[in-house]
Image (tube, helix red, strand yellow):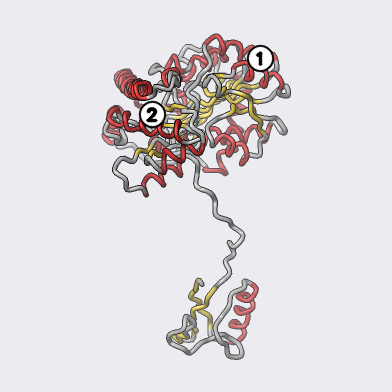
């Protein structure tokens, strides 16, 4: 039972008016006299305190106005970190969230980020509001990083770029634009995909359906299924594509397959909608990882690209990213940008400055830029090393003939192990390995030292749990 302190003017009319309001709000009071409810028992929660012509009393509310609000389930990805924190086992391992850790399994702040932050301190930069569309220097470099400085879409000012609240916020902005300007249009999402994609389009009231992507038999891409489903979708649908390092499968189309995907999308007049959350993290090269987006842009197709700097610059909690919409003319881009700003203004008004300045400083300075590339290669390299070691350990242990080579074929932060829910539960309950229930493990949270232990856990879960 909750209690609330009330202070009422000591006149009968105002007291009874207050009572009326209280009763309407289902507030219950203790034993009452004729006009107001006062309890003289000092130990009761309903205690009268009289002072200077006002009566103060404590009232108890036993029915919340939020009675109809049900408990939400934990988030399938971020909820895993909460469960991990509560576990006290010494061998516990958090392979849930896609966040880079050092070999010592500690969070990593890039050296180049610290340098950029020092620069900001030295310059004594202010904390004034940013424009709705974000920091101009950031918007310039982020679009150039994605498309390449010399790309005609940049030269001809055909890209509407606005700073967003990282990848998620940028996706959400574009979803709102789709809902407003393309009513009824469907977004096609890969099956499986990053869990939050569906939430984003649901909340924006944009209808979506899935296209085939992952083939459990080959633990590879179901390319024919993908093409057939994109072909079968209503003309003018949005097709959500992971620019590189597909989450959760770690399986990307080959350059040849990307061309065929572009062919079908063009043929059907669809609009590609790229989610680029791992530029530089898949191959270690920023340019290589942007090749899919650049292929579509080179064909003159109008497209959308959400960007995130959570992973490649380790700016997870700074919430820095962008939405880029490539239009067929500079005029259309200007109008689209104006509407993106209109959507952003009542949602969050304008974005935060800190991460935007870091990105602008790092990408805009040739020295810092090359240091960043070296650090990104180092991070991508560490992940490749644990990937190899995990494969070696599993192959050495498993004499059943099971082929684990898919681990080596997958790229990016994750490995999609093929473990089902019961097997994933065994990983957590028996082995204290925290992962998402779709069988995804984040190799960015694994150290060489723990590969052997993880291989034991996977071996046991795969062979001993059905
Ligand atoms: N798009 C994809 C494909 C992602 O994997 C993620 C992050 C995002 C967008 C959004 O990242 P921002 O931090 O908003 O830029 N996915 C991670 C991080 C945890 C989460 O679910 O937000 C993951 O573990 O899948």
Asked if labels 1 and 2 touch by Cβ distance under 8 angstroms, the answer is no
Callout 1 secondary element: helix
Residue 355 position, x and y percent, is 39, 34
Question: 50 or 381: which is nearer to us?
Answer: 381
Q: Which residue is mark 2?
A: 443
Residue 102 position, x and y percent, is 29, 31
Residue 383, relative to residue 41: is it above or below?
above
Which quadrant of the figure has residue 193? top right
Image mark for residue 316: none
Q: Mark 2 or 1 closer to N-term?
A: 1
- Disc 2/disc 1 C-alpha distance (Å): 33 Å
Image mark for residue 264: 1
Residue 36, relative to residue 278: is it above or below?
below
Instruction: Confirm whether residue 353 shows in the render.
Output: no
The residue under the point 60% across, 21% down is 303
Question: 144 or 207: which is nearer to us?
Answer: 207
């Amino acid at each position: 039972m909750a209690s609330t302190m009330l202070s009422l003017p000591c006149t009968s009319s105002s007291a009874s008016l207050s009572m009326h309001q209280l009763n309407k709000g289902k507030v219950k009071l203790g034993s009452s006299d004729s006009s107001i409810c006062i309890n003289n028992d000092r130990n009761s929660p309903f205690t009268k305190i009289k002072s200077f012509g006002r009566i103060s009393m404590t009232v108890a509310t036993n029915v919340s106005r939020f009675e109809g609000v049900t408990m939400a389930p934990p988030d399938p990805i971020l909820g895993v970190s909460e469960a991990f924190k509560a576990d006290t086992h010494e061998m516990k391992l958090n392979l849930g969230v896609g966040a880079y850790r050092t070999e010592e399994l500690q969070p990593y702040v890039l050296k180049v980020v610290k340098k950029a932050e020092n620069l900001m301190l030295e310059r004594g930069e202010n904390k004034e509001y940013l424009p709705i569309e974000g920091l101009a220097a950031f918007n310039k470099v982020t679009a150039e990083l994605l498309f390449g400085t010399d790309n005609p879409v940049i030269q001809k000012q055909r890209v509407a770029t606005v700073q967003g609240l990282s990848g998620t916020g940028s996706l959400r902005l574009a979803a709102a634009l789709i809902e407003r300007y393309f009513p009824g249009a469907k977004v096609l999402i890969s099956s499986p995909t990053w869990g939050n994609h569906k939430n984003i389009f649901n909340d924006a009231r944009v209808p979506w359906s899935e296209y085939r992507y992952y083939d459990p038999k080959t633990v590879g891409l179901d390319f024919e299924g993908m093409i057939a489903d994109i072909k079968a979708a209503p003309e003018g649908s949005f097709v959500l594509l992971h620019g590189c390092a597909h989450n959760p499968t770690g399986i990307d189309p080959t350059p040849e397959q990307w061309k065929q995907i572009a062919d079908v999308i063009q043929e059907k007049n669809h609009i590609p909608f790229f989610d680029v959350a791992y530029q530089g993290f898949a191959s270690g090269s920023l340019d290589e990882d942007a090749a899919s987006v650049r292929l579509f842009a080179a064909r003159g197709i109008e497209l959308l690209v959400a960007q995130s700097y959570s992973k490649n610059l380790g700016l997870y909690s700074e919430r820095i990213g962008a939405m880029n919409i490539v239009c067929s003319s500079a005029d259309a881009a200007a109008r689209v940008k104006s509407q993106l700003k209109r959507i952003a203004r009542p949602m969050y008004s304008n974005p935060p400055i800190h991460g935007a300045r870091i990105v602008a400083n790092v990408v805009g300075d040739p020295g810092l830029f090359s240091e960043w590339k070296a650090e990104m290669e180092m991070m991508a390299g560490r992940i490749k090393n644990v990937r190899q070691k995990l494969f070696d350990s599993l192959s050495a242990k498993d004499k059943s003939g099971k082929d684990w080579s898919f681990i080596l074929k997958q790229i990016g932060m994750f490995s999609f192990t093929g473990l089902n829910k019961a097997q994933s539960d065994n990983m957590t309950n028996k082995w204290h390995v925290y992962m998402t229930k779709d069988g995804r493990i984040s190799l960015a949270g694994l150290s060489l030292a723990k590969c052997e232990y993880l291989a034991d856990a996977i071996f046991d879960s795969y062979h001993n749990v059905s």
